[in-house]
Amino acid sequence: MHRLTNVASSGGVQSEDPAPQLFYHVKEDSKTHQASFTLPDKVGWTWTRLLLSVNQTDARLWVNCAQYSKVKLAGHIDLQIPEGGLLYFRQEPGLKNKLISHVPEPAAGRPGRRRHLRRPARAEAHPGFVFPYASQLQYGPPADLLPEYDFVIVGGGAAGCVLASRLTEREEWRVLLLEVGGVPELESFVPSILAIALVPGYKENWGYKTTPQNYSSQNFANKVSPKVQFQAARQHQGRVLGGGSTVNAMFYVRGNRRDFDRWAALGNPGWDYESVLPYFIKLEDYRGFGETAAYYGHGGPIGVTPAPITPLTEAYIQGGQELGYSFIDVNGPEQLGFSQAIFNIRDGVRSSVVKEYLRPASSRHNLHILHGANVLQILFNKDKRATGVKFLYNGEVMTVGASREVILSAGAIASPKLLMLSGVGPRDHLQDHQIPVVVDLPGVGLNVHDHLEVLGLSWTTKKLVTLNSLVDTFGLSSVLQYKLSKKGPIGTGPLNSVNAWVKVRPEGDPMWPDIQVFFNSATIAYDKGTLNPALWGLDMKKFEEYTHEIYGREGFTIRPILLRPKSRGTIRLQSRDPNDDPLIDPQLLADPDDVKTLVEGVKFALKLGSTSVFANKYKAKFFDKPLPDCAGHWYGSDAYWECFVRHMTNTFFHITGSCKMAPSSDPLGVVDHRLRVRGVSGLRVIDYSVVPEVMAGNTHAPTIMIAERGSDLIKADWSTEPSRHHHPSPAPSLPSRLLSLPFSLFPGVRRDARPGLHRGRPGPAECAEDQTQAAPPSSAAHRRVSGDAFISSGQAAARTQSLTARHAAEGAPSPACP
């Protein structure tokens, strides 16, 4: 009788939970091992079932323990475990699969240079689940890690999952996706409980904090150790397959057309609104109705669903109309106004990239997914070409090669960190940490900025709004409705959460908003300080001193958000140790102009909360207690609100700019307009870190767009290689029904919807990509939509007819570069 080997439960970290005692012996035929085990008697555990996974046959066996569901299981159970089998268990209430032991494999190893990894079988969805649950077995490691792949993608977040799906559409391309986090937990799929990702210590969040901020966050006290705390902001980043797509608030906002035209005007051809809009259309599967449905794509990977308008959100929209703003669709022709909330939800379930892109692609023979893998360094040869990566997996340092490219998609914090650890960054900084310099690239980790929000503006009401929201969402009828049909408030996203985009400063384009206004149906103190201070990292003593009068009171909150900050900060290495978090210093509110804009945003919020619909229908009253730290200023003056802003401002978790996309003339540029890293070859950065200036809205949709476009750039760049077979995919196009809309600009190119469906020739979007300078956007790009913005429907039709005739003459299945 031999005792089974204990195996780490996740990512190579030993579980603190007591593992079952397991023993095995080899039967006479040596083909199977028989195991018996005892489950520990631990308070709070109810053993429900066991899972046996078998590597070689991809078989699976659930051992049902339902008969023991009311008691703690003890005793012995015998199982037949083949060579190399993996034993999993599940316990309540955690609902987590844990790898607890394995049966040793035969001593004879596999020939060749491949690295053998233990691969769990794919698990079927448990029939009791409301929707299919992709457990950690769904994206198990490959049985054999190849010594070299065509592409190695570092980071399985919103961009990395899209790239893995799109690049493996080429059957001859072998792709490895490396992600340090694990597989999404069950709760991440349920739209209404998204706030759990903000709870400190949640394992799917990196838990980053900024360095002490000199100009903002003065009422914050995030701890760096049990005894040390400072004025800093929390900086949420997903640490899980899907990244922010798995843990974010699911708001679907493309951004303002002027944002993208600005990117192009800075010297990045191909990133203007005309060029990127088809990629948004390509990724969307709109589930709404009415006139605005024409603005969206249908049948794409990501579900896009408008939230129902409740009496409270209707009052919010009416308040905006009272102040002169229109009711709009934020993803329509113009962004200025009050919009219905639109979420990345499909059929009551979060529509994340890991579910919609990675899961369908995970069965492809040419895609290997390795989560729990911490990439330590990008490897370069003497010619400064990226040749692979070094990573840590299950306590072992490994290397893997990339014959074509290494693609860095680790996000706006980890991407510059990994570049610098690999010798790509500011020379002086690298030398300070004794890191050999591959290329001196000063812009790595600079240009860091984020949206900023002001917390604490609360209104109390005499009418129940918060309690009604909670009951409507989590009441028994809602739970039963969701369990039976995946419909109802639980599956529609955060109830009574809605946004507006307004212009509060007179400078600049009047249609380019500078403030986003977020509305939520609870005061900042409704939970009596149970969770709210910790969610943001607020100092508990200061929070209680300021808000204790409204503890538990009904009401709502309005939060102004700065959309186009001028302040710029840095991301720097703390040490050369890859396990140390980088130093994140966004220099929030360092530019005085940012403070002025937020003060005007606060004034707008006060006007909105005092509109007649809130005053009359809800008897709303602003909580006007002076903030104690600002008591020295005349209440309501600009000086008071500036003080309030500096104390109560937090990041909005949209950090960007750390690997700036820019022309060669910009000394702070890191990648070119094709997302290739300067000074080296075989390396790209494709994630939200490349954005030169943050756009006026939430960042999830633009990140997917960047990855979709980035995958097309890669395919185009490798399309002329004579030694490889190549089947280029078509550039995305607008559906024909959109050609008559005033914002349509991309006629004549075939639609490519879901991953892996089409093959064809590259479209005209790629024709001018090798330009070194972009022409400034035309005046039409900055006019209000009045039926003639960009091109007319008649021009679009004429252009479509011309392209079609030319392609027919050439015999081309899709538009080709002239």
Image (cartoon, grey):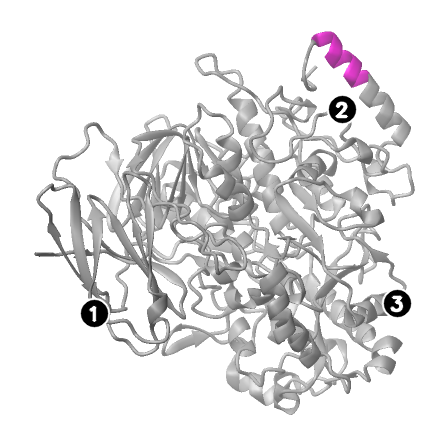
Q: Amino acid at mark 3?
A: Leu
Q: Is residue 504 left or right of residue 302?
A: right
Q: Is residue 613 left or right of residue 759?
A: right
Query: N-terminal of the two: label 3 or label 2?
Result: 3
Residue at 67% x, 64% y is: 488
Residue 75: give its label.
1
The residue under label 3 is: 323
Q: CA distance from mark 3 to mark 2?
A: 42 Å
Residue at 51% x, 40% y is: 360
Is residue 200 shown above or below 563?
Answer: below
Query: Between residues 610 and 468, which one lies in front from this camera angle?
Result: 468
Horizontal and vertical percent position of residue 316 = 80, 69
- Secondary structure under tag 2 reads loop
Magenta region: which residues?
Answer: 802-810
Pointer 1 and pointer 2: residues touching (CB < 8 Å)?
A: no
Is residue 480 shown above or below 729?
Answer: below
The residue under label 2 is: 748
Horizontal and vertical percent position of residue 762 = 63, 22
Q: Which class describes the residues within 10 Å of circle 3: few (<14), some (14-19), or many (20+)?
A: few
